[in-house]
Image: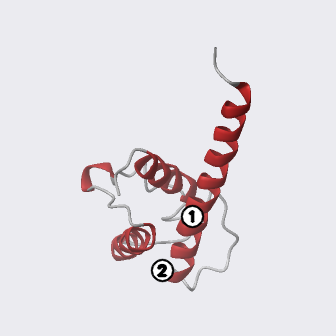
């Protein structure tokens, strides 16, 4: 039988880890796009209609996130869907980190 307390503690730890990863992504966005003055949320688009990153901006963002997180984001995972919003990038980074792809 599963231990409900362990499940709860694991869930809390996972939420904290997700929040920390989201913080890494948000900080990287602020460094990469200092002209963006809007608020950041998980739903903030990274390209047009949001932060406004172009192809060079996306490259700079990915490199910054990799450097600060210690996780290599593999090229085949850097899709339009993964890079659509700040939250999608953060979720992907969290999954990579959780599965040991550091």
Q: Please, is residue 43 above or below residue 26 in the view? A: above
Describe residue 95's horizontal placement relative to residue 4 as left or right: left
Give the residue displayed 48% in from the left and 80% down from the top.
32
Marks 1 and 2, Cα distance to the nearest angstrom? Answer: 16 Å
Which residue corresponds to mark 2? 32
Disc nearer the start of the sequence (1/2)? 2
Foreground: 48 or 55?
55
Q: Residues within 10 Å of mark 1 (few under 14, many from 20)?
A: few
Residue 90 image point, x, y percent: 52, 56
User: Which type of secondary structure does the marked residue at label 1 adopt?
Assistant: loop
Q: Given this view, does label 1 or label 2 mark the residue nearer the observer?
A: 2
Left or right of 40, for residue 102 = left
Quadrant housing residue 69: bottom left
Residues 53 and 98: in front is: 98
Residue, x 48% and y 65% (percent of image)? 47
Residue 49 position, x and y percent, is: 57, 64
Tell me where residue 30 appears, x and y as whole percent. Answer: 57, 78
Q: Residue furthest top?
A: 1
Numbered badge on residue 1: none
Q: Residues within 10 Å of mark 2 (few under 14, many from 20)?
A: many
Residue at 39 percent of width and 69 percent of height: 58
Residue 49, disc: 1
Residue 16 or 42: which is nearer the viewer? 16
Is residue 10 depicted above or below 62 in this figure?
above
Q: Residue at x 34, y 71 (%)?
A: 59
**Which residue is nearer to you in this view: 84 or 28?**
28
Point out residue 70 in the picture as x, y percentages from the top left corner: 39, 66
Residue 19 appears left or right of 90: right
Taking the view exactly as shown, the residue that stands out farthest to the bottom is 35
Quarter holding the C terminus is bottom left
């Amino acid at each position: 039988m599963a231990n409900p307390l362990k499940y709860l503690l694991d869930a809390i730890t996972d939420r904290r880890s997700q929040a920390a990863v989201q913080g890494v992504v948000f900080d990287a966005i602020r460094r990469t796009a200092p002209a963006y003055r809007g608020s950041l949320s998980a739903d903030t688009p990274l390209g047009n209609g949001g932060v406004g990153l172009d192809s060079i901006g996306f490259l700079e963002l990915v490199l910054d996130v990799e450097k600060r997180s210690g996780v290599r984001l593999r090229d085949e995972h850097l899709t339009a869907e993964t890079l659509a919003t700040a939250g999608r990038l953060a979720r992907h980074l969290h999954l990579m980190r959780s599965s040991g792809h550091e």
